[in-house]
Image (cartoon, rainbow, N blue to C red):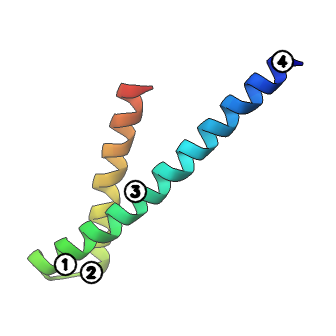
Amino acid sequence: MAGIARRSGRQTSVVTVTLVLVGAEAVVVVAEWGLLAWALGGGRRRLLLASLAMNGASTLAGVILLW
């Protein structure tokens, strides 16, 4: 029974950390998108995709290195 509680607690921690990470990345994407639009002008949709790609690559690299 203790093993189940321990596993359940760990799984909850992973879910919580994942949700916090996704929320923080969303804030970063929006802020970076605004900065890119301000600094470069041009297509806002294209800059949003660039921001998503950059942050996705950064997050993936962090997960691979720190997992």
Mark toward the start of the polypeptide (2 vs 1): 1
Tell me: 23 left or right of 61.
right
Q: Indicate which disc, 1 or 3, sits on the residue closer to the N terminus.
A: 3
Q: Disc 4 designates what residue?
A: 2
Q: Nearer the viewer, mark 2 or mark 1?
A: 1
Q: Nearer the viewer, residue 42 or 32?
A: 32
Residue that label 2 marks: 44
Instruction: Give the mark count.
Output: 4
Q: CA distance from mark 1 to mark 3?
A: 18 Å
Cα gap from disc 2 to disc 1, whole angstroms: 6 Å
Instruction: Please tell me in which quadrant of the rendered image residue 44 appears.
Output: bottom left
Going from the N terminus, do you reach mark 4 or mark 2 first? 4
The residue carrying pointer 4 sits among few (fewer than 14), some (14 to 19) or many (20 or more) residues within 10 Å by Cα, namely few
Type of the residue with mark 1: Ala
- Residues marked 2 and 1 touching at CB (< 8 Å): yes
Rendered image quadrant of residue 28 = bottom left
Location of residue 13 in the rendering, given as x and y in whole percent from the top left corner: 62, 37
Instruction: Assign a secondary structure to mark 2.
Output: helix
Give the residue number, with chain letter if any, for mark 1.
37
Secondary structure of residue under mark 3:
helix
The x, y position of residue 49, in whole percent, is 33, 66
4 vs 1, front mark = 4
